[in-house]
Amino acid sequence: MSIETVRFGPDAPAPLALAGTALFLDLDGTLAPIAARPQDVVPDPRRTSLLERLSGRLDGRLAVISGRSLEDIDRILEACVRPVAAVHGLVRRRGDGALEETSPHPGLIEAGAAFRGMAAADPRLLVEDKGRSIALHYRQAPDVAWAARLTAERLAAETGLWRQDGAMVAELRTPGPSKGDSVRAFLGEPPFLGARPVFVGDDFTDEDGFAAVGPLGGFGVLVGPARPTSAQFRLRNVDDALGWLEAALCPD
């Protein structure tokens, strides 16, 4: 495959130059298609090989920044990436393997009980407990979106948890570092120090990441349909995102 054989949309970024770049990648909707249930996303040889090769060419300047738990990220990516920010930045594993974790907020107990009560009444709903956040997925029940978000808003006001808006999910998280904070933290330590940051993501939860890289000389790439965003460029879907990353590995 050569860069010339890859076709992207009109607002796609130029071919990615790896020299001096630090790459920050979301997972769901960016490296993997969105699934009806979080557990339906499984390891993929193409994705694992791509990340391993990119990390090697970048001398380790590649991090995955996702709303998933650290354990789930390692499951899906077959632990091929060491630097990871999980649960939207509340858990961060540095390049040297050291962990930084924010303690769970006590309000998660009340929020989890409320979300599980809703799921018990409607089997189309799915509750995901990430330890430091609790999420109510309603992808299979879009008609209850309003009720789910209203419940999350009420619980946030009552408990002090932060409401984390996402695609077809109502999530409440422990207050603490964001995806943008994670980007800045990685860039302050080896091997990311001094590199130009590029953040690729799809969701509203990635806006903090997009906003973080611009002032640092980098750029954001939105994956998916056009919408108001802080990203400077856009790729149409996961396949385009993977293709764009693969093209960076091709010789000139």
Image (cartoon, rainbow, N blue to C red):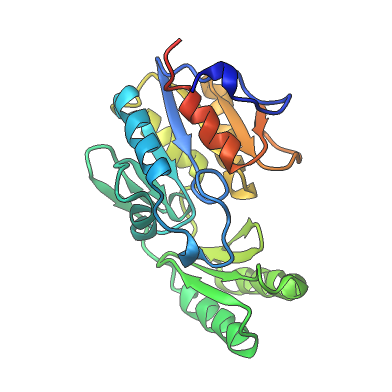
Rendered position, 75 above or below 194: below
Image position, residue 116 (x, y; %): 54, 83
Image position, residue 134 (x, y; %): 50, 69
Residue at the far top in the pictured view: 252
Locate residue 71: give its quadrant.
bottom left
User: 225 and 119: which one is in front?
Assistant: 225
User: 131 and 126: which one is in front?
Assistant: 126
Q: Residue at x 59, y 30 (%)?
A: 220
Residue at the far bottom in the pictured view: 121
Locate residue 182: give its quadrant.
top left
Numbered circles on residues, count:
0
Image position, residue 163 (x, y; %): 61, 62
Q: Residue at x 73, y 24 (%)?
A: 10
Q: Residue at x 54, y 28 (%)?
A: 244
Locate residue 30: give its quadrant.
top right
Judge left or right: residue 246 versus residue 102.
right
Judge left or right: residue 178 versus residue 57.
right
Rendered position, 36 above or below 5: below
Image position, residue 130 (x, y; %): 43, 66
Rendered position, 67 above or below 120: above
User: 50 and 179: which one is in front?
Assistant: 50
Judge left or right: residue 7 versus residue 18.
right
